[in-house]
Amino acid sequence: MNTERLLVSYALCVAWMIGLGGLHRFYNGKIGTGLLWLFTWGIFGVGQFVDLFLIPNMTEEYEMKLRAKHGLSPYGVPVNAHTLAATAVNPPKEEKLMFKLLKAARDRGGRISVTQAVLDTKADFPEVEATLKDMVHKGYAHIDNDPIKGTVVYDFPEL
């Protein structure tokens, strides 16, 4: 994570004290909510306070969007035909599991629980759960609850 972007975001968040709520949201590409924060004084300070805890994820998400826009992977590695070919031949173990999880979720209508994922991929529970949480953190999936059983499910909206 870029600590400079994080520090600037916190500094802009503090600008709320002089009536400029939401500057940190503009800085991190959230124009709509930035305007809302600006015109409501950070939703009367409550939204501004909550953002103190959300800023790290907000900055990381924006950095990932910037990397993708410039042709870089989430890890900052340039993505080109050579890199893609090398990865396709020998993908890391984590990426193999992600691919298996995506296929399993697709086969289940875009939603999968940890137990279903373990059964479909034959990987162990901690590995599957960690990979699914990583996919949520990277924005590939969302956590939800099954309306009937109440179990935690991972929803892949693109599938």
Image: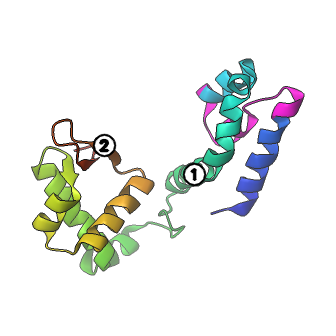
Give the image quarter of residue 127.
bottom left
What residue is shown at x 17% (from left), y 61% (from top)? Answer: 115
Q: Which residue bears the numbered disc 1?
A: 57
Q: Residues within 10 Å of mark 2 (few under 14, many from 20)?
A: some
Q: Nearer the viewer, residue 73 or 97?
A: 97
Q: Name the kind of residue labelled 1 in the image.
A: Asn
Q: Nearer the viewer, residue 110 or 27?
A: 110
- Give the x, y percent position of residue 80: 42, 67
Is 31 magenta? The answer is: yes
Q: Where are the magenta residues, as a range? A: 16-32
> Compared to 88, does 45 lie above or below?
above
What residue is shown at x 78% (from left), y 50% (from top)? Answer: 8
**What numbered label is drawn on residue 144?**
2
In this picture, residue 21 sits left or right of residue 46: right
Q: Secondary structure at mark 1?
A: helix
- In the picture, which quadrant includes the C terminus? top left
Q: Secondary structure at mark 2?
A: strand
> Compared to 107, does 114 lie above or below?
below
Q: Name the kind of residue labelled 2 in the image.
A: Asp
